Image (cartoon, helix red, strand yellow):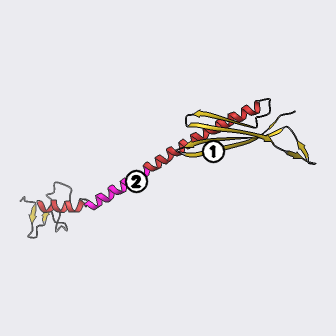
Amino acid sequence: MQRSERQRRDGVIEKRSNGIFNTSALYHSNTPMMTGRTSQTRARLQYAFALYEVLLGVAIFAIGVVALGRAVQNCLNASTISEEESAVRQILSDRMAEVQAASIVPDPQKEFKINSNYGVIKLIQKSAPANLTEEGNTLLTGINLVTLTAHWQHGGVPQSKQLQFYVYRSG
């Protein structure tokens, strides 16, 4: 043992300053300095995680990963459905523009099958006189109500969208 250290019977080592370093001397320390296996065992018990703590942490992490995966899957499904509906709206809009640009009266019923990136879309066009009246119960002639209906399937589930508009053709 060095000159500046002294060990008591209860295992506590006291260190006295030798004046070289700016540290205070330790007299009657509350925390005994242990050496050997006893301190290593205590350190392991004090700082190590129990198996159940590790398993609980892994389970919480796994639940979070699964929830995140499902959220991403739902976002992808919603994006696909949105793109499909956008394509169908575009098809309906294009057909409406064709009917409005034509100079003849729309056909009473017509059916189209359109191939798209999302499968076959069945487009049904129906036209009938609108039978609109103005003040005084005067029947307005030459105005037709056109109904466009698109049918398609998404994941085996039938989907449909409908668009109605008026077209005026004189004579």
Asked if 119 appears above or below 57 in the picture, the reply is: above
Q: Is residue 120 magenta?
A: no
Looking at the magenta stretch, what is its main secondary structure? helix
Q: Nearer the viewer, mark 1 or mark 2?
A: 1
Q: Which residue is nearer to you in this view: 49 or 124?
A: 124
Q: Quadrant of the C terminus?
A: top right
How crowded pointer 1 is (Cα within 10 Å; few <14, some 14-19, many 20+) is rated as: some
Q: State the residue in front, 24 or 45.
A: 45
The residue that appears at 33% across and 57% down in the rendered structure is 57
Residue type at numbered disc 2: Gly
Q: Is residue 167 above or below residue 56?
A: above
The percent position of residue 118, horizontal first and vertical second, equals: 55, 37
For residue 160, which numbered disc appears in the image? Answer: 1
Image-quadrant location for residue 101: top right
Which residue is the site of mark 2?
64
In the rendering, at what x and y percent does residue 47 appear?
Answer: 24, 59
The answer to whether residue 33 is left or right of residue 89 is left
Amino acid type, callout 1: Ser
| Viewport quadrant of the N terminus | bottom left
Residues in magenta? 50-68
